[in-house]
């Protein structure tokens, strides 16, 4: 590494950064990935690692982003048995019944016809409409549209792509989620059934949702959710393997001490004698915090209006509980939507998302143990939680978890009230999940891949928040394309 001038130094090892790094190395660029320990959002307790669980694995279906990425990287993704469609995708625990959610239009239709006879026709029409809009939005990104567009050429490409859409799609750009849902006559229970899944599949909860955002989320309900043996770590390792095999480099560091934004950028790492020299920098951690700490003097424009945007009023709080794996009841899935009152509007009082750490995966819990992550939506009226409020909410959540898992108290190692609040605070400070701009044409973008500094780029959840892993994949692909063009000049 010493003496090497890298084309790109990637700071952080979130999935989007690793995917972008693998693509850039495959394209022939000198790439260094820096794993910064101080950037990780996690807490250790005993032999457990408390950190955000990966969302459901989607974006890997026919014509979706990871298929394109893995094809370019030469990964025979669909031939590997550890990547399979989840069957069932997840479970919904309603007050009187637990439903395993299947994948595939025929299976989904059968479930609705049995459980929601009065609503089935409207539900199917809603999902068909969502799938129609979602396929068009995905097609825009597949055409290398940079989103959100800022430069003249980027705006030209986006406007040209939009001009080729039908009039209904242009009208849809101005339609809100609430107006979209109002078009379909659903009973309270049927609406709660769909809305609960919508919030479960989205990784953030924007205050103003658009039709396009809703379509992208709803389109996951009846197809395209995968199970990955080994979890997120498998995907990260695949990218690291490709980076190493194509002669890219990985470097661990406790922290970044300083960055000199000169003619050639120099990054000083703790414990490393000589600085890293690089032409471009790609950040896959908190970009707002990065620009604030290192404050490059020659930035053009500003991220400040995005960085200063308050995080969404509706947000998430997650409680972590460590348990013996024997307490998990037979038939309970690793991902469960818990709806305690289907007749009431979706809120933190009656909606929770329960996730179990993968069985046998020691990344989160020791052998014969599981970590439970239980997430609720915090209502706007609650505001930011303080320590006392988080503990009160946590105790309420723990009580609901007892209803879901029998004999829970007999097999619980600990309830991580303090650690859960610490993680909540860390995530609420992360600018990578700001409120979605209501003026945004698609309603699914926040921070752009390009930053105010011409040599600093960003890839991560903040570019397409709410789209989960598919959003990270799209962000990585767009960042890699931008850097490829920038470095080719």
Image (cartoon, rainbow, N blue to C red):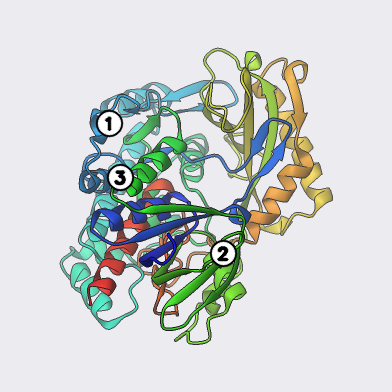
Any part of residue 273 in sight: yes
Q: Residue at x 40, y 24 (%)?
A: 88
Which quarter of the figure has residue 177? bottom left
89 lies left or right of 406? left
Front-lying residue, 191 or 135: 135
Q: Residues within 10 Å of mark 3 (few under 14, many from 20)?
A: few
Please name which of the two marks, 1 or 3, marks the residue nearer to the observer: 3
Q: CA distance from mark 1 to mark 3?
A: 40 Å
Q: Earlier in the sequence, mark 1 or mark 2?
A: 1
Q: Residue farthest to the left? A: 164
Position of residue 257 relative to residue 240, above or below, is below
Residue 245's disc is: 3
Q: Residue farthest to the right? A: 388
Q: Quadrant of the C terminus?
A: bottom left
Name the residue that disc number 1 marks. 105
Marks 1/3 in contact by CB < 8 Å: the verdict is no
Q: Residues within 10 Å of mark 1 (few under 14, many from 20)?
A: some
Q: Position of residue 106 (x, y in %)?
A: 26, 26
Which quarter of the figure has residue 28? bottom left
Position of residue 264 relative to residue 257, above or below, is below
Q: Position of residue 15 (x, y in %)?
A: 43, 49
Q: Residues within 10 Å of mark 2 (few under 14, many from 20)?
A: few
Residue 392's disc is: none
Marks 2/3 in contact by CB < 8 Å: the verdict is no
Front-lying residue, 152 or 93: 152
Name the residue that disc number 2 marks. 273
């Amino acid at each position: 590494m010493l003496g090497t001038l890298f084309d790109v130094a990637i700071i952080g090892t979130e999935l989007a950064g690793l995917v972008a790094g693998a693509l850039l190395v495959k394209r022939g660029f000198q790439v260094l990935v820096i794993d910064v320990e101080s950037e990780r959002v996690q807490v250790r307790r005993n032999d457990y690692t408390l950190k955000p669980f990966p969302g459901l694995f989607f974006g890997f279906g026919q014509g979706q982003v990871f298929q394109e990425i893995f094809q370019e990287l030469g990964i025979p993704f669909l031939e590997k048995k550890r990547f399979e469609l989840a069957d069932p995708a997840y479970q919904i625990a309603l007050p009187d019944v637990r439903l395993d959610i299947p994948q595939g239009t025929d299976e989904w239709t059968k479930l609705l016809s049995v459980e929601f006879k009065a609503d089935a026709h409207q539900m199917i029409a809603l999902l068909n409409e969502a799938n129609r809009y979602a396929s068009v939005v995905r097609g825009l990104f597949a055409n290398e549209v940079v989103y959100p567009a800022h430069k003249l050429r980027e705006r030209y490409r986006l406007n040209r792509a939009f001009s080729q859409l039908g009039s209904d799609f242009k009208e849809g750009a101005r339609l809100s989620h609430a107006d979209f849902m109002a078009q379909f006559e659903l009973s309270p229970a049927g609406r709660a059934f769909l809305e609960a899944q919508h919030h479960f599949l989205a990784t953030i909860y924007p205050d103003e949702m658009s039709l396009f955002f809703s379509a992208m989320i709803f389109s996951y309900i009846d197809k395209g959710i995968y199970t990955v043996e080994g979890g997120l770590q498998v995907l990260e390792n695949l990218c690291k393997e490709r980076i190493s095999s194509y002669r890219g480099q990985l470097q661990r560091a406790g922290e970044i001490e300083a960055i000199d934004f000169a003619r050639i950028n120099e990054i000083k790492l703790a414990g490393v004698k000589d600085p890293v020299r690089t032409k471009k920098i790609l950040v896959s951690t908190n970009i707002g915090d990065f620009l604030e700490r290192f404050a490059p003097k020659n930035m053009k424009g500003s991220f400040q209006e995005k960085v200063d945007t308050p995080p969404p009023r509706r947000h998430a709080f997650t409680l972590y509980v460590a348990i013996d794996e024997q307490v998990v009841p037979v038939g309970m899935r690793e991902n469960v939507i818990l709806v305690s009152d289907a007749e009431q509007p979706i809120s933190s009082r009656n909606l929770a998302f329960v996730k179990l750490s993968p069985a046998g995966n020691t990344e989160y819990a020791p052998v014969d143990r599981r970590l439970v992550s239980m997430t609720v939506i915090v209502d706007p009226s609650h505001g930011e939680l303080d320590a006392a409020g988080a503990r009160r909410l946590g105790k309420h959540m723990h009580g609901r978890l007892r209803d879901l898992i029998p004999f829970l108290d007999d097999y619980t190692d600990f309830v991580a009230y303090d650690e859960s609040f610490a993680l909540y605070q860390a995530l609420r400070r992360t600018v990578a999940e700001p409120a979605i701009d209501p003026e945004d044409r698609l309603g699914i973008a926040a921070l752009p891949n390009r930053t105010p500094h011409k040599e600093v780029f960003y890839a991560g959840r903040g570019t397409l928040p709410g789209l989960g892993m598919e959003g990270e994949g799209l962000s990585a692909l767009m960042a890699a394309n931008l850097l490829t063009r920038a470095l080719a000049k």
